[in-house]
């Protein structure tokens, strides 16, 4: 639910798609990391996912996974 009710519509779409595709197969550690990511500011998340700025290093792998899923990988 937290993936779908974000502050900006773009992140609703991106994270809803990611959650639908990935959450069922995530380990407890991966779910915890994703939960922490969801606490980040939507404007920052959007800039990270869109490649406008480099992501926080602690989320780099997860952001890359999201970017790959949405077709915005570098």
Image: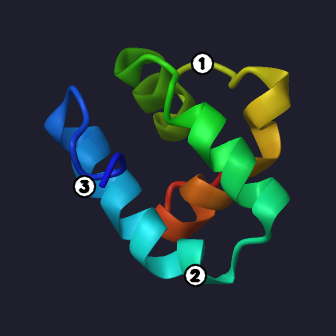
Q: Residue at x 56, y 29 (%)?
A: 48
Q: Please give left or right for residue 29 compared with residue 32 in the image.
A: right
Q: CA–CA distance between discs 3 and 1?
A: 20 Å
User: What residue is disc 1 on?
Assistant: 53
Where residue 10 appears, as percent x and y from the top left, is: 23, 41
User: Is residue 64 at all visible to an observer of this figure?
Assistant: no
Q: Please give left or right for residue 62 compared with residue 34 in the image.
A: right
* Rendered position, 46 above or below 73: above
Q: Please give left or right for residue 34 compared with residue 58 in the image.
A: left
What is the crowding at mark 1: few (fewer than 14 residues within 10 Å), some, or many (at least 20)?
A: few
User: What residue is disc 3 on?
Assistant: 13
Colour scheme in use: rainbow
Q: Residue at x 37, y 17 (%)?
A: 43
Q: Residue at x 54, y 69 (%)?
A: 69
Q: Nearer the viewer, mark 2 or mark 1?
A: 2
Q: Please give left or right for residue 33 compared with residue 29 in the image.
A: left
The first of marks 2 and 3 along the sequence is 3
Where residue 53 appears, as percent x and y from the top left, is: 60, 18
Q: Nearer the viewer, mark 3 or mark 1?
A: 3
User: What residue is disc 2 on?
Assistant: 24
Q: CA–CA distance between discs 2 and 1?
A: 29 Å
Q: Residue at x 30, y 55 (%)?
A: 1
- State the SS at label 3: helix
The first of marks 2 and 1 along the sequence is 2
Where residue 33 appears, as percent x and y from the top left, is: 73, 44
The first of marks 3 and 1 along the sequence is 3
- State the SS at label 1: loop
Which residue, as the protein is rendered here, is positioned at the far left?
9
What is the crowding at mark 2: few (fewer than 14 residues within 10 Å), some, or many (at least 20)?
A: few
């Amino acid at each position: 639910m937290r993936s779908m009710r974000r502050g900006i519509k773009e992140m609703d779409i991106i994270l809803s798609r990611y959650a639908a595709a990935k959450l069922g197969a995530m380990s407890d550690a991966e779910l915890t990391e994703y939960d922490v990511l969801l606490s980040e500011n939507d404007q920052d998340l959007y800039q990270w996912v869109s490649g406008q700025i480099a992501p926080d290093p602690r989320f780099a792998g997860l952001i890359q996974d999201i970017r790959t899923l949405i077709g915005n990988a570098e």
